[in-house]
Image: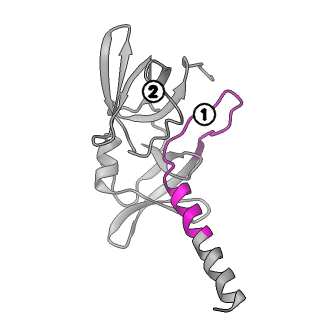
Amino acid sequence: MGRGNEMSRILVATLVCGAVVLGANGLSFADEKGKGAHRHYKGEVVEKAGSLAIKDETGSTYSLSEKEAGRQGREFKVGDKVDFTVNENNTLIDVHLAGEKGKHKHVTGKLVHVGLMKKEIKLQTADGEKTFPLLLQETKTKALTEGTEVTVELNEAGTVIDLHEGKHKDKH
């Protein structure tokens, strides 16, 4: 085998591994220094390949499956003007009709369990154990161990769209 051919295989293997690692990240922590910040955009619901998608002002599109809309607690149709949020991995995590304010809730508690088979997280809160569905199974929990204090951000449907270590600090 030639040296150039071997280098090509190594490059492809490296790219594939990188894509797998990057693709495994869903929601992630927004740390104390502000890394992992969400980005907010305006867009319009469009049809793309027979499914719904959101097209932003730059022409980029983000998939909006019926299942995803359900997790957002809404129904959308082609032509709807929307405000939406993506995380640091460009994953759609929140969608609202334009001008509609989100009514998100933050719940803090000690981590009891993150489901591997079922997309959920269980916290021990001041009001007892609470289980919440996760928007993405790939929620990046880093090296969190049971008993770690975390705050989950819930959308209007009660689904976890973000996760932070420690107590919630209001940014407003």
The kind of secondary structure element at disc 1 is loop
Q: Is residue 119 shown above or below 158?
A: below
Asked whether 137 or 36 is in front, the reply is: 137
What's the residue at 28%, 43% (across, down)? 117
Q: Which mark is residue 160?
A: none
Can residue 97 be seen from the camera position used here? no
- Would you name the residue on which mark 2 appears? 152
Which amino acid type corresponds to the residue marked 2 in the rendered image?
A: Val
170 vs 117, nearest the viewer: 117
Give percent across and percent down for residue 27: 49, 42
Residue numbers of the magenta segment: 14-40
In the drawing, what numbered circle is on residue 30?
Answer: 1
Task: Find the distance from the CA under tag 2 to the CA under tag 1.
Answer: 11 Å
- Residue 45 at what x, y percent from top left? 42, 58
Quarter where residue 133 is shown = top left
* Label 2: which secondary element: strand
Crowd band around label 1 with a 10 angstrom C-alpha radius: few (<14), some (14–19), many (20+): some
- Above or below for 106 versus 75: above
How many numbered markers are drawn?
Answer: 2
- Residue located at (65% from left, 88% from top): 5
Q: Compared to 64, does 141 lie above or below?
A: above
Q: Is residue 7 left or right of residue 130?
A: right
Which residue: 29% across, 51% down?
67
